[in-house]
Image: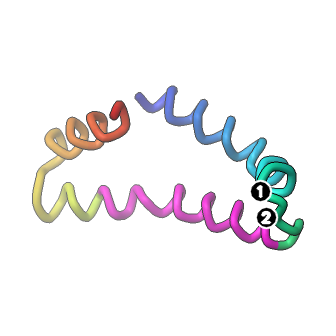
C-alpha cells in the first residue's frame, strides 16, 4: 500500500501545475498555491491518522480502515 501511495503521490505532484494551468486555465500563481496546499495536506494527514489510531481505533484497525478507504 505504501509503495502504491508513493507512486500516486509523486505522479500527481509532478503533473499538477501543468494540469491546473493547462486544463483548468488557472494562473501560475494560483496553480502553485493549490499545488502547495495539496502537498501540505498530503504531508499533514498522517498526523490525523495517528490521532485517530491513538484515540479511538488502535494501530491495526486504523491500518485496515485506511487501506480500505484507499482501495475504494
Task: Say whether marks 2 and 1 touch (CB < 8 Å).
Answer: yes
Q: Quadrant of residue 48?
A: bottom left
Kindly identify the residue that appears in the image at 60 percent across and 41 percent down: 9
Give the x, y percent position of residue 55.
14, 65
Q: Nearer the viewer, residue 21 or 49?
A: 21
**Quadrant assignment, res 27:** bottom right
**Residue 69, horizontal then vertical, whole percent:** 30, 40
Q: Which mark is residue 16?
A: none
Total of numbered circles in the picture? 2
Horizontal and vertical percent for residue 26? 82, 65
Task: Depth check: give the residue in front, 54 or 5.
Answer: 5
Q: Residue sitting at 86 percent across and 51 percent down? A: 22
**Badge 1 density bin: few <14, some 14–19, many ≥20, Cα 10 Å:** few
Instruction: Say whether disc 2 or disc 1 marks the residue closer to the N-terminus.
Output: 1
Secondary element at tag 2: helix
> Which residue carries the number 1 mark?
24
> Which callout, 2 or 1, points to the residue nearer the camera?
1
Q: Does the magenta stretch include residue 16?
A: no
Magenta residues span 30-49
Real-space Cα separation, disc 2 to disc 1, in angstroms: 9 Å
**Predominant secondary structure, magenta span:** helix
Dot 2 crowding, Cα within 10 Å, few <14, some 14–19, many 20+: many
- Check the image and report above or below for 29 versus 64: below
Residue at position x 79%, y 65% in the image:
32
Whether residue 61 sits left or right of residue 47 in the image: it is left
Does the magenta-highlighted stretch encompass residue 35?
A: yes
Q: In this view, does 19 lie to the left or right of 64?
A: right
Q: Where residue 49 sits: x, y (%)?
A: 31, 56
Q: What element carries label 1?
A: loop
| Residue 31's disc number | 2
Amino acid at each position: 500500500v505504501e509503495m502504491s501511495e508513493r507512486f500516486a503521490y509523486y505522479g500527481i505532484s509532478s503533473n499538477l501545475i501543468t494540469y491546473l494551468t493547462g486544463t483548468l486555465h488557472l494562473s501560475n500563481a494560483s496553480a502553485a498555491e493549490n499545488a502547495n496546499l495539496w502537498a501540505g495536506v498530503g504531508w499533514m494527514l498522517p498526523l490525523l491518522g495517528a490521532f485517530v489510531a491513538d484515540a479511538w481505533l488502535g494501530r491495526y484497525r486504523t491500518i485496515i480502515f485506511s487501506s480500505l478507504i484507499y482501495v475504494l
